C-alpha cells in the first residue's frame, strides 16, 4: 500500500474463498485496490447508492452461481466496507423491512 492509498476499514463481512470463488475473490480484491488508489468506478462494477447515504456505493461482483454485493462508503481518509452479501431477488410485492 502506497502512502497515498486509503485504507480499507471493514465494519462487516469479508471476502474469502469459499464462499467466493477464486475468480470472484480476485476481482473483488482488484476493484477494492482501485478504490484505495482513488479510482472512481462505474457500472457495471459499481453504482452509487444515495438511498443508503452520502458517498455510498455498491460493488457488483459476478460469481459462478451468484452475484455478490459489497456496500462501501468513500470517506476522505478511508474506504469503509459496510456489508458483503449475496444479491437475491425478492418475489414480486415483497419488501425488506
Image: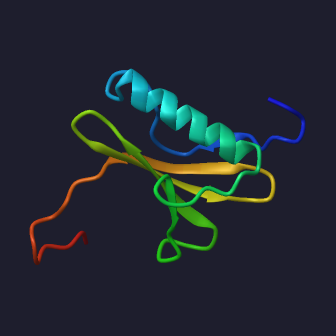
Q: Specify whether 40 is left or right of 15.
A: right
Along the viewing direction, whichever of 94 and 35 lies nearer the viewer = 35
Q: Quadrant of residue 4?
A: top right
Q: Quadrant of residue 24?
A: top left
Answer above or below: position of 92 versus 23.
Answer: below
- Please identify the quadrant where the N terminus is shown: top right
Q: Specify whether 60 is left or right of 77.
A: left
Q: Name the residue: 45% across, 40% down.
A: 13
Q: Specify whether 85 is left or right of 6.
A: left
State the image coordinates of residue 79 (x, y, percent, origin top left): 67, 49
- Please identify the quadrant where the C terminus is shown: bottom left
Along the viewing direction, whichever of 10 and 28 lies nearer the viewer = 28
How many marks do you count on the picture? 0
Answer above or below: position of 27 versus 49.
Answer: above
Residue at the front extreme of this rendering? 44
Q: Name the residue: 90% across, 35% down.
A: 3
Q: What colour-coding does the image apply?
A: rainbow
State the image coordinates of residue 38 (x, y, percent, origin top left): 76, 51
Along the viewing direction, whichever of 12 and 73 lies nearer the viewer = 73
Q: Name the residue: 49% across, 52% down.
A: 45
Answer above or below: position of 41 versus 31.
Answer: below
Answer above or below: position of 48 versus 76.
Answer: below
Residue at the right extreme of this rendering? 3
State the image coordinates of residue 7 (x, y, percent, origin top left): 74, 40
Q: Specify whether 73 is left or right of 86.
A: right
State the image coordinates of residue 86 (x, y, percent, origin top left): 30, 46
Amino acid at each position: 500500500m502506497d502512502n497515498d492509498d486509503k485504507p480499507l476499514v471493514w465494519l462487516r463481512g469479508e471476502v474469502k474463498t469459499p464462499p467466493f470463488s477464486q475468480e470472484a475473490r480476485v476481482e473483488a480484491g482488484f476493484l477494492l485496490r482501485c478504490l484505495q488508489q482513488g479510482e472512481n468506478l462505474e457500472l457495471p462494477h459499481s453504482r452509487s447508492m444515495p438511498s443508503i447515504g452520502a458517498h455510498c456505493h455498491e460493488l457488483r461482483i459476478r460469481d459462478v452461481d451468484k452475484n455478490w454485493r459489497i456496500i462501501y462508503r468513500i470517506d476522505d481518509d478511508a474506504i469503509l466496507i459496510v456489508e458483503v452479501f449475496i444479491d437475491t431477488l425478492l418475489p414480486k410485492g415483497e419488501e425488506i423491512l
